Image: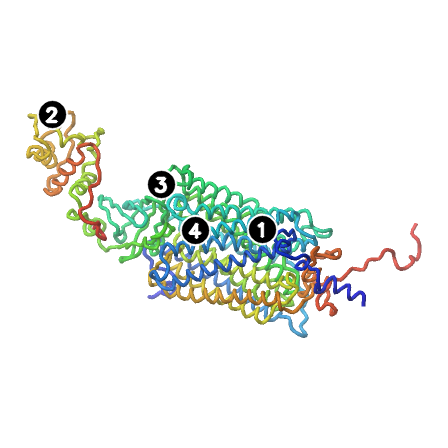
Amino acid sequence: MATITQKQQLFGHAASNHYLDASRGVMSWIFTLDHKRIAIMYMYGVIASLFLAGVFALVLRTELYTPKEWFLSSAQYNQMFTLHGAVMVFLFIIPSVPAIIGNFVLPMMLGAKDVAFPRLNLASLWLYWLGGIFFIVVLATTQLDTGWTFYTPYSTSSSKTNVIAATMGAFILGFSSIFTGLNFLVTINTMRPKGMPWFRLPLLLWALYSTSIIQVLATPVLGITLLLLIVERTLKLGIFDPAYGGDPLLYQHFFWFYSHPAVYIMILPAMGVISEMLAVHCRKEVFGYKFIALSSVAIALIGFLVWGHHMFTSGQSELTSLVFSAITFTVAVPSAIKVFNWLCTMYRGDINLSTPMLYVMSFIFLFGIGGLTGLWLGALSTDIPLHDTYFVVAHFHYVMVGGTMTALLGGLFHWWPKMSGRMYNEPLGKLFCFLVFVGFNLTFFPQFIMGSLGMPRRYHEYAEIYQTYHQASTWGAFTLGIGIFGAMMVLVHAWYFGRKCSGNPWGAATLEWQCSSPPSFHNFEHRVIVSEPYDFGSVVYDESVDGYIPIIPKREAAPSQQPASVPH
Amino acid sequence: MINPMQSLAQFYLPAKGSTFADKTDFLFDAILWISIISFVAIVVVMCWFAVIYRRRPGYVPKPSPTHSTVLELIWTLGPSVILVWIFFEGASGYADLRTPDNQAELIEVKAFQFGWQFTYPNGEITDTLHLSVNQPVRLQLVSDDVIHSFYVPEFRAKMDVMPGRKHSLWFKPILVGDFKLFCTEYCGDGHSKMVKDVKVHAEPWAEMLRKNVRWKDDQNHPVTNGHRLYNIYCAGCHSYDGSAKTGPSFKGLASSTSRDFVSGPSLSFGGPDSDEWQNYVSDSIRIPDKQIVKGFANQMPSFEGKLSPDQIGYIIKFLQAVDGGTYSEPAKPTPAPEGAGP
């Protein structure tokens, strides 16, 4: 009896004194150093940003239902698409997976109590809030109409909107991102437990590590660029505006030097999440672990060298365009490797078609389209007509939303039992996953066609030949909106009313599942037992906790039998 | 014979309006089929695995390998070969895009918030782009304010229009018809209204220009008309700011009271409105070798028959206006109507 109680305490549903209960009051959250609480607070901010920018998207799509102006003026439309993009990029998608899922599970995957620098972690959250406040200021004042890219000289000399507040906000959010990256790098480098060399690291950590390298190395360039932009706008120094002797192409080089690697800040953690969920829900070791792990690093490094493919029509030299096109194709290879390895992981698996697994399959489908459509944009001659059309819009939404947001939703369903200690409603989870999938494709697939037919992006009014595609897209956007909202409601319902679950309901082998759900303040009440991250034979189902518990290897201090003869 | 691929392509590609379209569309379709085949393969395999290996009572998964270096090398190198081919195909199309035909006629394009202006080799300006079928053109683009971008989907050509630096773009239209020119770099409130007509005419270039790209004198101030004629016919040899060129400068000409010549008697004038002065200017344009200004050689061709009496009148008005050495655009007599140029 005693052993069962101990088991339940260690690996079951935490009855009390878990991290959510450990202390009370608003201050205990605002000043917490607990990575789990910081993750939860990040989640509120990120989901609120998703909601806000999602509403902007629906307003845009509604306006675009008709080819001529309907209820938004050109100026309002331009502000709407700018804020949709800026909020989605800086406040939602860049922090999404690392700050929520990364913060919550990274230390636990290492069997650690917290990240290496808990205070830096809290500072990163506060900077995130501060950056968010700047964007609220932008919303409340003259708004912003430059596009999220802040291209000069429009942003420095022509726009009448609050460019400075917005770029300040993005600058501050950049530091939040750097802090998180730095923290993860140091944590993974120094806090791996005994028995976990690099090639026993869960693949999510490989992905977060690669992401963090980009965050630390690329984000400062964005910071410098945005400061220069502010200086140019206020003092007219002649950095980016040719009217004062500056060069607008310089701005584009600076901007994309960060913003292309930022694409990998967005997608790499999502790929890590997919690898984790796939292994667990197929109950099978990830096929080609080393290839997947190293492909994350390869993507991170090559990702630094391809920024010029955003500028094929900008007037950069022909040679520059050729080189960037060639390097762009090399980055396609590691992405393809991942997809093939994921498929092989499913081969002869024990596939549990749960909600997270459906999100994984949805991810492979959507990221497949997003990745393949990149081929048209990487090839020079086909990129020229497609550049800055809806084809590009559809392409990056397939990667960013179809990829990252799908992985984020799937990841939330997958780790929700760990975060909340409760199970979500499986049929409803699947229903809304399906709705997100259908809505997403209905929104963005028509955009490929109107793009290849020549519909430019960022157009308030458009030619009537494109109207059918726009209308399909608008219907899709509302379906997608309902799907995401429904999925969130399933999670909220689970948080309060879900069935209580054990520490390891999925039978996963990574370390974060070796503690109670939700985890205690200190994460682990016992020394973790490190095995291969995807050795599913290392856990066994235990009825008394209604979940999986690790098999504790037998340790013997001395041989049980007397040796026949004593060796000389 | 109807090519089934081509009739299918009309649902996702614009008409083939320039010589670039064939090559670009070939690569577009090639990538399309590569993508469809690999995507369908991926999704079919994924769904098939999800069905046959799904967790169910009585199902025990068989052991399977955790990695296979051979397999992984195959799907690393296999796609790489295809990617290299796509890169070279794209680069070769791009090389065509960036290598102007040496028969190309030059059109200067100015973009501004929120419109376009086209200046043709004959000096005329329009706000609709007129082209001749099969006549290659090179557009030299420059912006007055922020970045714009020149894009005609049918021509498969696009180039950003920068302030402070010139970019060129060339193409050879092969389809007669009306097309739309889009601005494809976000430039402010009127961005989606920076759409202009592009007309590709069946007539040869010179005839097309004569028919469509014509200045309308009656819609402009006489001095503006004169300035335009000056730019086309006179500016090569005569300055109006006093700087030295092949011929005498026009600065101070209108207010001069006398003129000395290489041979023959000097003339004296009673001001710019006097008959003597106006006749002198008119003669100098029509019969330039009659009186050669002292210090200059007889190099000017006759414009008899090239310039009408009205046009000579505009030039006289222009000379009066630039007497001080500077030119300022007079206010237009009427607000510029749509298509003020042709």
Q: Nearer the viewer, residue A370 or B114?
A: B114
Q: Are the residues at dot 1 and dot 2 in contact (C-beta closer than 8 Å)?
A: no
Q: Position of residue A100 (x, y in %)?
A: 59, 56
Res. A141 mark: 4
Observer able to see residue A396? yes
- Residue that lies at the very extreme toward the bottom in this rendered image: B57
Q: Are marks 3 and 2 on the same chain?
A: yes
Q: Which residue is mark 3?
A: B165
Discs 2 and 4 share one subunit: no
- Residue carrying label 2: B262
- Give the left or right position of residue A201, taking residue B228 as reference: right
Chain ID at mark 4: A
Q: Is residue B155 left or right of residue A507?
A: left
> How far separated are the C-alphas under marks 2 and 4?
73 Å
Decide: few, some or many residues near mark 1? Use Cα within 10 Å; few <14, some 14-19, many ≥20: many
Mark 1: which secondary structure? helix
> Which of the two labelled residues, at mark 3 and mark 2, occupies the earlier sequence position?
3
Q: Nearer the viewer, residue B134 or B114?
A: B114
Rendered residue at 45%/54% (across/down):
A83
| Disc 1 versus disc 2: nearer the observer | 1
